[in-house]
Image (spheres, rainbow, N blue to C red):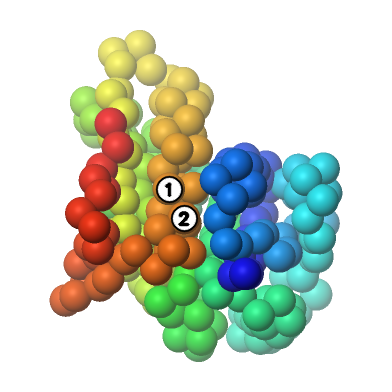
Amino acid sequence: MKNIVVLISGRGSNLQAIAKVCAAEAWNARVAAVISNRADAAGRDVAAAMGIATEVVDHHGFASREAFDANLATAIERHAPDVLVLAGFMRILTPAFVRRFEGRMVNVHPSLLPAFAGLHTHRRVLQAGCKLSGATVHFVTPELDHGPIIAQAVVPVLADDTEMSLAERVLAAEHRLYPMAVGWLVQGSLRVADGVVRHRAGAAQLLS
Ligand code: GAR
């Protein structure tokens, strides 16, 4: 049985989507723990309602990013993670932390990376007049919102979209995309060559 550890900072809807599909498809895996850097993250209630243990490692309690990351890593390692999932975890991670979990740590970002890395994604997509947006699941590397792309989902940008309506459409796509990608990781279905991720059996890595 593989252990999935999920890091959150907020709502936890991607955590919920992953845990649901993990149970529904009877993966040989379980969400062993949810760790939040905020005590008030709503996703902690989501986890508790699904019977998943939660912990808080509050970044305010540490003098430096390095000290926070070292404590976070210790908390994570206690659950012997095979896969570490960042699901709306809004902290920049130190290179030492990333190296420790590289190859088994993934993130979801609400844009078609490498476009629109960073914050205020939907606002910037609308300001740029893009007609297409989406979500990306990628392996985490030291550079923020970069790293080999596992899968992407595309959604249209509509003429009357607001930041909120676009965010909703992208989030719904994330809820299909992220469980699929984490499932592949758990099942060992991916290989990476020269920074490019391929599904071993050729499954489509694009959702539309
Ligand atoms: C998601 O839209 C995710 O793509 C985004 O935070 C939201 C978390 O929602 N992550 C990032 O922007 C990371 N750069 P959730 O807490 O409901 O899963």
Residue 149 location, x and y as percent? 29, 59
Specify whether residue 68 is in view: no
Q: The C terminus lies in which quarter of the figure?
A: top left
Residue 34 location, x and y as percent? 71, 60
As drawn, the residue found furthest toward the left would be 194
> Tags 1 and 2 in contact by the CB under 8 Å rule?
yes
Q: Nearer the viewer, residue 147 or 58?
A: 147
Specify whether residue 134 is in view: yes
Disc 1 on helix, strand or loop? helix
The residue sitting at 49% across, 47% down in the picture is 179
**140 vs 110: above or below:** below
Image-quadrant location for residue 62: bottom right
Which residue is disc 1 drawn over?
A: 180
Q: Nearer the viewer, residue 44 or 51?
A: 51
The residue sitting at 25% across, 63% down in the picture is 200
The disc placed on residue 183 is 2
Question: Badge 2 local density, few (<14 within 10 Å), some, or many (20+)?
Answer: some
Question: Badge 1 local density, few (<14 within 10 Å), some, or many (20+)?
Answer: some
